[in-house]
Amino acid sequence: MNDQSNQYQQLIAKCWADEDFKQRLLDNPVETLKAEGMELPEGVRVQVVENTSQDLTLVIPARPTELSDAELGSVGGGKMAGGSVCL
């Protein structure tokens, strides 16, 4: 598991354990992430949303530039876990 994935998992666990932290992350994600030691490239906007039983957030990743249309067409997958869709 890479460091970025591990940081993300720790961040989610902290949100689940600490309601005040979660609210800070929702209200001011860039400042909160930087306070947690996560580096963000200059000019990057961060949007944090919370899935609920009534709201589901689907994130469409940026299209990879190294794959052809034919290669993209052959890619399939996805996983539904706890109300999240991972593609």
Image (cartoon, rainbow, N blue to C red):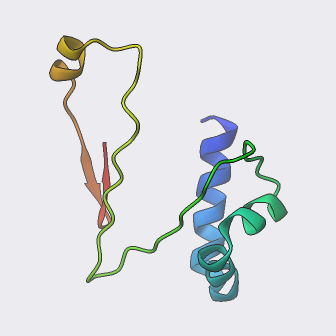
Name the residue at 41% across, 36% down.
62
In the image shown, does 71 or 52 lie closer to the viewer?
71
Picture quadrant where residue 83 is located: bottom left
Count of number-bearing discs: 0
Name the residue at 31% across, 42% down.
87
| Residue 82 against residue 72 in the figure, above or below | below
Q: Residue 58 location in percent, x, y?
A: 31, 58
| Residue 16 against residue 12 in the figure, above or below | below
Picture quadrant where residue 11 is located: bottom right
Q: Residue furthest front?
A: 43
Name the residue at 24% across, 43% down.
78
- In the rendered view of the protein, which quadrant contains the N terminus? top right
Residue 64 horizontal side relative to residue 47, left or right: left
Q: Residue 24 location in percent, x, y?
A: 69, 80
Residue 20 horizontal side relative to residue 66, left or right: right
Picture quadrant where residue 36 is located: bottom right
| Residue 15 against residue 4 in the figure, above or below | below
Q: Residue 20 location in percent, x, y?
A: 68, 87
Residue 52 horizontal side relative to residue 80, left or right: right
